[in-house]
Image (tube, rainbow, N blue to C red):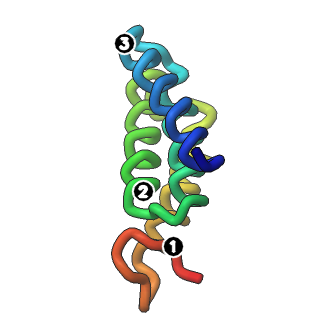
């Protein structure tokens, strides 16, 4: 199993546990999963996880959550990558 696949497996398990218990750690776990997916070249999935992370920060800490501005900035960066000209579906531009 490759490094990205192994990381993804563990992060998805951590996310399952966070969601099961309603943990505020869900947001950071989703951000870590988004980073892993982006590094593996799975940009569309990374974008979806980052969007879910932003929603989790808002749900668990409201609009004043201290990590929310950085999460929104990261989301904007992923959206920019996703909209890059010449990008084929679900691949990070090279």
Q: Quadrant of residue 7?
A: top right
Q: Is mark 2 on a helix, strand or loop?
A: helix
Between the residue at mark 2 and the residue at mark 1, the CA separation in whole angstroms equals 11 Å
Instruction: From the top left corner, tell me how far across and down residue 25 is, in percent.
Output: 54, 22
Between the residue at mark 2 and the residue at mark 3, the CA separation in whole angstroms equals 23 Å
Instruction: From the top left corner, tell me how far across and down residue 5 is, in percent.
Output: 54, 46
Residue beneath the point at 65% across and 47% down: 3
Where's the C terminus, which quadrant?
bottom right
Task: Tell me, yes or no, whether the two marked residues, 2 and 3, touch with CB atoms within 8 Å.
Answer: no
Q: Quadrant of residue 74?
A: bottom right
Instruction: From the top left corner, tell me how far across and down residue 66 is, in percent.
Output: 62, 33
Identify the residue under disc 2: 47
Identify the residue under disc 3: 20
Residue beneath the point at 40% across and 22% down: 16
Identify the residue under disc 1: 92
Residue beneath the point at 38% across and 37% down: 55
Mark 3 or 1, nearer chain start: 3
Instruction: From the top left corner, tell me how far across and down residue 35 is, in percent.
Output: 58, 51
Between the residue at mark 3 and the residue at mark 1, the CA separation in whole angstroms equals 31 Å
Residue beneath the point at 57% across and 33% down: 28
Q: Is mark 1 on a helix, strand or loop?
A: loop
Where's the N terminus, which quadrant?
top right
Q: What element carries label 3?
A: helix
Q: Residues within 10 Å of mark 2 (few under 14, many from 20)?
A: many
Residue at the limit of the structure toward the bottom, as seen here: 86
């Amino acid at each position: 199993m490759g490094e990205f696949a192994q990381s993804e497996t563990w992060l998805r398990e951590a996310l399952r546990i966070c969601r099961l218990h309603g943990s505020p750690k869900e947001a950071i776990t989703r951000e870590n999963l988004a980073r892993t997916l982006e590094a593996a070249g799975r940009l569309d999935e990374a974008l979806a996880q980052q969007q879910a992370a932003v929603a989790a920060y808002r749900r668990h800490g409201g609009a004043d959550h201290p990590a929310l501005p950085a999460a929104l900035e990261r989301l904007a960066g992923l959206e920019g990558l996703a909209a890059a000209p010449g990008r084929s579906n679900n691949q990070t531009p090279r």
